[in-house]
Structure formats: structure tokens, C-alpha cells
Amino acid sequence: MDKRPVAFLDSGIGGIPYCRHFVSRNPGEPVVYLADHANFPYGGRSREELREILRGITEELAAREDPKILVLACNTATVSALSFLRDSFPRLIFVGTVPAVKPAALNSKTRRIGVLGTRRTVDDPYIQELADRYGGGVTIFPAAAPELVEFVEYRYARSGAEERRQAVIPYLERFRNLGVDGVVLGCTHFLFLLKEFREEAAPDLGIYDSVEGITRRIESLLDGGLSGGPGGGLAETPAGGGAAFRRFYVREGSPEGESPWPFWAAGMGFELMKL
Ligand code: DGL
């Protein structure tokens, strides 16, 4: 087995649902998570700014951890910088996260779907390209939800069920009024609210996300002998019998009040480290 980790990167906690899902299915794989909270939110930044930020952080992460795969568990980072990062780091394998437009378009009867993301993501021409490529003539209604990103990053952990419900309802109402029948969660932060989205969307709106798809993509790369043929691939049990290492890196910026990072790292069973 290739003992280098699979790394997940987001501007904050958004990549956690993706990382958790991968870990739950691949308990033997070493994994690192990186929250670039110093630059949060990515969604209000320009493409050029994000490319510079992501180049710097990828360089540092590569030097520290030498990941075998770097998952951009962030739609904003992916639409802004995936091809740029692939060109800048030709030896690194990247997996990007993009809104799950294809399944939503395939299932749409009204031929109208909503995409909820950050300002940067919904304004990027890539969303329309996805629709043109996979949409079969479907019309996309994009909506930016920066307040919902902030809600998840800063308040989700202490929020109650009713507050979470109220946080998603206005977006679903807006989409209903537009006649869409599917809503794509195009920002990884929104996965924390998947239950609320699903409950409030039923029965007339479908909710689509990319967690399964991304996990399968990583697994197929690992399975495909990324780590070198026989003996490589996915680890069912930790190599050498010990526990696979799990590190949660945070670039914190200037924290106010009590740091939330010990809570998030401990919740995942990861060791907290500063970057
Ligand atoms: N979680 C990120 C995404 O998927 C972005 C959140 C932010 O604006 O930083 O787009």
C-alpha cells in the first residue's frame, strides 16, 4: 500500500462531509484534512486571487504531507483553479468537486434545475458549460448563498433543528417559484444541511450532491493501482496493523474567541495541527 495520505482541502469545514464519507468507507487509508480558514470565504474572492492562494497552500501541503491525491473538497476552488493547479503541479493527482448538474438534469421533468453555490461558483462560466455538456437542454437557475456558507461555518455547530430548517427554506421557496424540480447543492458547506434540505424539499424538489461521486472517483484512482500495482490500491486495514494516520490542518487567520478547530478535529478523530 502507498502510505501517503489522501488530502482534502476546503476554505473551512465544508470538505468535512466529503472527508468523513471517504474515511467511513476506507478506514485503512491515511487521510489529512486542511481548512484554509485564514482565507475564508473563498466565494467572495476573484479567480486570480484564489489561484494564488491555492498554489501557495498546495505547495505547503505537498512539502509537508506529499499526498497521493489532493481532493479539492470545494466547488469554488475547483471551478476557479483546478486546471491551473493541474498545470502547476503536474506530478500531483487532483480530484475536483463540481455541482452535480448531470443527475439533476437527467431526472428533471420541468427541464429547470437550481444550482446553489457561492457567488464565485455560480458566476463562473463553468456552470453553464456543465449544463451544456450534461444538461440535455435543461435551463439552469443559479443562486449565490454566501449567508448560508457563513451560517454553516460559524453557527451550524451550535444551531438547533428549527434554526437549520429556517436557514434552508427561503432558498427552496425561491427555486419553487422558478418552477425547478431539482436543486443541486453546489457548495460543500451545504452538505451539513442535507437532511434539512431533503426534508423541506420533499415531495416536489429533488436534492442533488456530489459526495458519493467524489468518493467513488477517489476510490477508483486508488484502485486503479495509483500506488503501484499488486499490494497497492485501497487499504482495507491499516498498513502494518497500526491505525492509519489522520491529521486536521488548519490555517486559522486571526481567531476571535474560542477556537472551533479542536471540536471539529476531535469529532473526526483527527489530530489537530497548524499550517
Ligand atoms: N465550501 C466551498 C465550496 O464548495 C466554499 C465556501 C467559501 O465561500 O469559502 O464552494
Image (cartoon, rainbow, N blue to C red):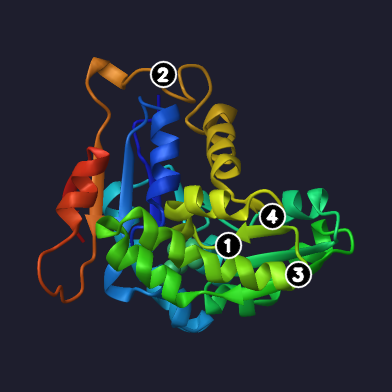
Lower sequence index among marks 4 and 1: 1
Q: Please, which residue is most extreme toward the right here? A: 137
Q: Which residue is mark 3?
A: 140
Nearest-to-viewer mark from 3 and 2 = 3
Disc 4 is placed on an element classified as loop
Lower sequence index among marks 4 and 2: 4
Lower sequence index among marks 4 and 3: 3
**Going 13% across and 75% down the picture, which residue do you hit?**
256
**Going 64% across and 58% down the picture, which residue do you hit?**
184
Decide if residue 155 is on the left or right side of residue 84: left
Residue 205 image label: 4
Question: Whole-Å distance between the Cαs marked 4 and 1?
Answer: 16 Å
Question: Whole-Å distance between the Cαs marked 1 and 3?
Answer: 12 Å
Q: Which residue is mark 2?
A: 236
Q: Which residue is mark 1?
A: 186
Q: Quadrant of residue 55?
A: bottom left
Amino acid at dot 3: Ile
Lower sequence index among marks 3 and 2: 3
Amino acid at dot 1: Gly
Q: Quadrant of residue 99?
A: bottom right
Amino acid at dot 2: Glu
In the image shown, does 14 or 1 lie closer to the viewer?
14
Decide if residue 85 is on the left or right side of residue 182: left
Asked whether the residues under the numbered discs 1 and 2 touch, taking CB atoms below 8 Å apart as contact, a structural biologist would say: no
Asked whether the residues under the numbered discs 3 and 2 touch, taking CB atoms below 8 Å apart as contact, a structural biologist would say: no
Q: Is mark 1 within 8 Å of ligand 1?
A: yes
Question: Whole-Å distance between the Cαs marked 3 and 2?
Answer: 40 Å
Q: Is residue 36 in view?
A: no
**Going 60% across and 65% down the picture, which residue do you hit?**
172
Lower sequence index among marks 1 and 3: 3
Disc 3 is placed on an element classified as strand
* Relative to 8, residue 254 above or below: below
